[in-house]
Amino acid sequence: MTQRSERALFLIGFMGCGKTTVGAIVAERLGWRFADTDALVEAREQRSIERIFHESGEGHFREAEWRALQSICDVARIVVATGGGLYLGRVQRGLMRAAGTTMWLDAALPIVRARLAASTGRPLWGTGDPLAQRAFFEKRRAIYALADARIDAGTGSPDEVAARVIARFLPLFH
C-alpha cells in the first residue's frame, strides 16, 4: 500500500462541476500526474461515451469505467477526475477511498443546468425534463456526500476552485 503522502486524489461530483478542468489545474500545481476516467474509457474504446451508451449500453460503459479506475488506483501522486456516476457504486467508492482521498466538487442545480445547456454527449442528462433532472441530480448528491470532503465548485473560476481543493487536501495529505 502506498504511503499516505503518495495516495491519489479523486475528484467526484455531478457532470458539469468542473472535475476535469479543476483536476488538471490541481495536478499541475501539485506536480502530480492527472487522469480523467472518461477520457481513459474513450481512449480504450476508441469512441465517445455517447456512442458507447448508444451502441453498447450503459452496462458496458460502467464495466469500462470500472476497468479504467482499477488501472490507476495503484498510481502514486495522481489527481483523478472521475465520471459523474463512478462514485455511485459501493465497490468503486470503496476502492477510491482505499487508494486515496475523495473530494466532492459540488454546485447547485441551476449552475449545473447552465453549464450543461451547451454541452453534448451527456446521455444521462438529455431528457430536458426539469423534474427528472432534479431527481437525478439529488439522488447522486446524496451519495457524493459520502466523500472525504466537499468543495464549492459553483462559485469562482476554475483556478479558485483548484485553490480550494488544494487548501482542503493538503492537511489530509500529510
Image (cartoon, helix red, strand yellow):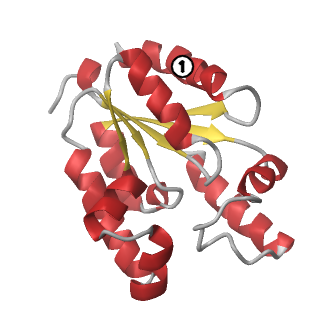
Q: Residue at x 84, y 51 (%)?
A: 110
Asked whether residue 52 is in view, the answer is yes
| In this rendering, position of residue 7 left or right of residue 172 | left
Q: Is 18 rendered above or below residue 124?
A: above
**Where in the figure is residue 48, as x and y percent of width and height?**
44, 68
Residue of label 1: 168
Quadrant in the picture for residue 73: top left
At mark 1, the secondary structure is helix
Q: Which amino acid does label 1 sit on?
A: Arg
**Where in the figure is residue 98, as x and y percent of width and height?**
29, 41
Quadrant in the picture for residue 96: top left
| In this rendering, position of residue 144 left or right of residue 48 | right
Q: Which of 86 and 115 is in front in this view?
A: 115
Q: Residues within 10 Å of mark 1 (few under 14, many from 20)?
A: some
| In this rendering, position of residue 52 left or right of residue 70 | right
Q: Which residue is drawn at 53% across and 56% down?
A: 84
